[in-house]
Image: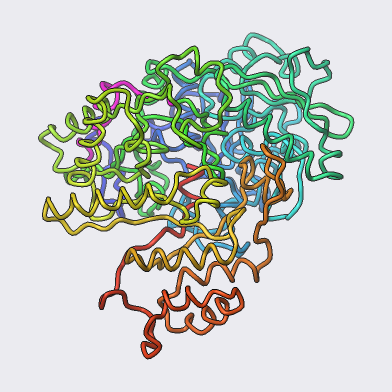
Amino acid sequence: MKISKESKNINKDYHLPLPPKSSYLPTSKDEMDDLGWDMADIIIFSGDAYVDHPSFGAAVIGRVLQKAGYKVAIVPQPNWRDDLRDFKKLGKPRLFFGVSAGAMDSMVNHYTANRRMRHDDAYTPGGRHGMRPDYPTIVYSGILKDLYPDVPVIAGGIEASLRRVSHYDYWLDRLRPSILADCSADMIIYGMGERPIVELAKRIEQGESITGIKDIPQTVFFSEDTPAKNDIVLNSYEDCLKNKKLQSLNFRHIEEESNKYHGNVIWQKIGNRMIRINPMYPPMTPQEMDASFDLPYTRMPHPRYRGKHIPAYDMIRHSVNMHRGCFGGCAFCTISAHQGKFIASRSKDSIMREVRQVCGMPDFKGYISDLGGPSANMYAMGGINKDICKKCVRPSCLHPKPCPNLNNDHSPLLDIYHSVDSLPEVKKSFIGSGVRYDLSMAPAKTPEIASVNRRYMTELIAEHVSGRLKVAPEHTSDDVLAIMRKPSFEMFRRFKTIFDNTNKKQGLRQQLIPYFISSHPGCREVDMAELACITKELDFHLEQVQDFTPTPMTVATEIYYSGYHPYTGEKIFTARTEREKLAQRQFFFWYKPESRRQIIDSLRKLHRPDLIEKLYPNPGNRSGGHVNGRRSNNRTTSDRSNRKNR
């Protein structure tokens, strides 16, 4: 997008010229007046700052509705504590209000795995904490219904999407009903919302009542109808409260239907009412993906934030998202529950248009920070025989073994990389998203594809790593990894050999950054002790770590809450108390002098003197902090929740 020469808006912190306000969706009455609007058709209330970029959900939904011909306004991070002027300033919309907590579940945004308050918010100017309430979906919709009881309120975004059925809330430590029962919204749109929101707007504009619209996919609402023959009726919320195993049994249906190409309607009774959950749309076509990503985003924060950094924007300002969905099916991840397991990819032309737009940004220095997606190397992948995919109920195409129908050809991805790197403005393109190395190492259908996949790994390591490559083995215990739906740790060892050999051959000194999780369901203290020994052997020092955080709509969370695996009915141990979690977490820090005595005492209680000898072979070395005479800087991440809810 060209920047107007007349624009005098300068972001003093980013040092960027900003487009005029008229290039954005309006956020104030003055901006609406400047556009000549008496009222908006749709007003979106968001828990995030307004960044007009395809990585920010409110901007996407607003631009899609704008393209469909509607006047859309956005109220970002409204003040819910005062006289509610932010909720009144734009008046009532002609059609409906939209409500979103933002790009993250608000509780993940606000609290750590230990339920301690975070001190910052990446989606707020200046990283300031406290600009949204806990559960904004509930708070915002309640305020709007009190002020405008006759206007429909539609909830969307990750928070509403993943709380669409009864779910365990880790922060309150109890089972809660569908968020629709706790908030005042008339309807939830779950998942990626471009198609359902436009269809809903058309139907309301045509005069249909919100209570009469029952057939739009990806919608959730209370219904007085009777379930049809092929519909799935879950155990009621009240029965799940009485018997945790019933909640576990419910989840298998929820996950399987979310991952089907054509799912069934799901019902659940809450009190005297029934909620109806319509199935997902089929995955978006490349043409539909392009239509969303090619909208006239300014790719910039709104001018109202000039002079202030928005940390989440800093991360993605020079990045390009190439696809949606993930078929990995990790037990702790919410991506498939929100985006689906089938990959929806953009066309190469659309991707290259956005890359050129990034190259034209005034602050672009020649480096694309990420050519990625939920899993960076799933672009353009899927089943060879689509008819098989349409009947499939597997939550993962990679676990327990790669699906024989899966096409893991990395040729389209390499073609994108080569085309981007050939642009004269691009010095280098990096892959900042997580990579599924097991996907590129999985058996290929032909020798030609196998050769391409080997070349992909070599080029990835040699050409697209900014000094550190992030991968996610998650654990070293094969028993724990099986519950996580992750490959054996031997796969990581093989990949590390490839990484090290490529670095040596290319004369590089890059780091491999592995993510590990403690306290995951199925993980015991001794598993973490063995992880410490194995990572020491591999010369990793894990300085920032991640405890498992139960989030709604994951297999791991259902195990944590109920104690049972939803698919096998097997009872599974999970560390739940603070003491149990700390006992596991301490092994990440075996190399710290202050951790040594406690770890030795723990290993003695576990009757594992062999592990003491592996961690501390030299009793005279009090530090325990060096491996082969040097200290490593490899680390995991402390903000895995950001990566899983984006």
Q: From what the image shows, is residue 589 above or below residue 460?
A: below
Q: Residue at x 83, y 30 (%)?
A: 269
In the image shown, does 542 or 639 lie closer to the viewer? 542
Q: How many marks?
A: 0
Q: What is the x, y in percent for residue 401?
A: 46, 34
Q: Position of residue 321 (x, y in %)?
A: 35, 34
Q: Residue at x 64, y 43 (%)?
A: 552
- Colour basis: rainbow
In this view, 646 is above or below 628:
above
Give how far across and how far down residue 241 sits, in percent: 83, 44
**Picture quarter containing residue 208?**
top right
What is the chief secondary structure element of the magenta stretch?
A: helix
Residue 352 within the segment the image draws in magenta? yes
Query: For this rendering, which residue is in front, 531 or 284?
Result: 531
Q: Nearer the viewer, residue 19 or 642?
A: 642
Q: x, y percentage for residue 626?
A: 32, 77
Asked whether residue 437 is drawn in magenta, I would say no
**Is any part of residue 326 visible from this angle?**
no
Q: Residue at x 22, y 57 (%)?
A: 510
Above/below status of 19 relative to 623:
above
Magenta residues span 343-361
Splitting the image into 4 quarters, where does residue 230 fall? top right
Q: Is residue 532 left or right of residue 173?
A: left
Q: Is residue 291 visible?
A: yes
Taking 36 as reference, is 578 left or right? right
Which quarter of the rendered picture does the N terminus lie within?
A: top left
